[in-house]
Image (spheres, rainbow, N blue to C red):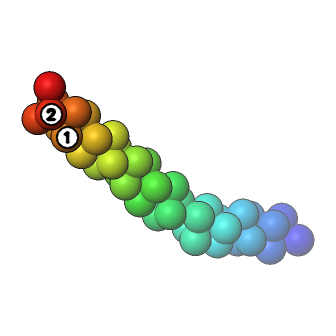
Amino acid sequence: MLWAIISIIVGIIVIVWPHIIAYVIGLYLIIVGILSLIGALV
C-alpha cells in the first residue's frame, strides 16, 4: 500500500519536475532576452 503511494508520488514528480525546470529556464531566457533588447534600444 505504502509502496504504491510512494511510486505514484515519485512518478508524478518525475513527470512534472522536468517541466518545472524547463519553465524556469525558459522564463529566465525570455527575461534575459527582453532586458538585452531594452539595453540595446537604450
**Residue 12 x/y as whole percent:** 67, 67
Crowdedness near tag 2: few (<14), some (14–19) or many (≥20) residues, C-alpha within 10 Å: few
Classify residue 10 as left or right of residue 18. right
Which mark identifies residue 41? 2
- The residue drawn where x is 33% and y is 48% is 30
**Residue kind at label 2, given as amino acid type:** Leu
Which mark identifies residue 5? none
Is residue 32 visible to the viewer in this orientation of the structure? no
Q: How much space separates mark 1 and mark 2, taking CA atoms?
A: 6 Å
Q: Which quadrant is the C terminus positioned in?
A: top left
| 31, 9: nearer the viewer | 31
Kindly indicate the quadrant of the structure image that contains residue 34: top left
**Residue kind at label 1, given as amino acid type:** Leu
Kindly indicate the quadrant of the structure image that contains residue 21: bottom left
Is residue 4 visible to the viewer in this orientation of the structure? yes
- The residue drawn where x is 74% and y is 71% is 8
- The residue drawn where x is 33% and y is 40% is 31
| 35, 9: nearer the viewer | 35
Q: What element carries label 2?
A: helix
| 42, 7: nearer the viewer | 42
Furthest-left residue in this view: 40
- The residue drawn where x is 80% and y is 73% is 4
Crowdedness near tag 1: few (<14), some (14–19) or many (≥20) residues, C-alpha within 10 Å: few
Image: 19 above or below 24: below
Mark 1–mark 2 CB contact (< 8 Å): yes
Instruction: List the residue tagged with mark 1.
Output: 37
Classify residue 12 as left or right of residue 2. left
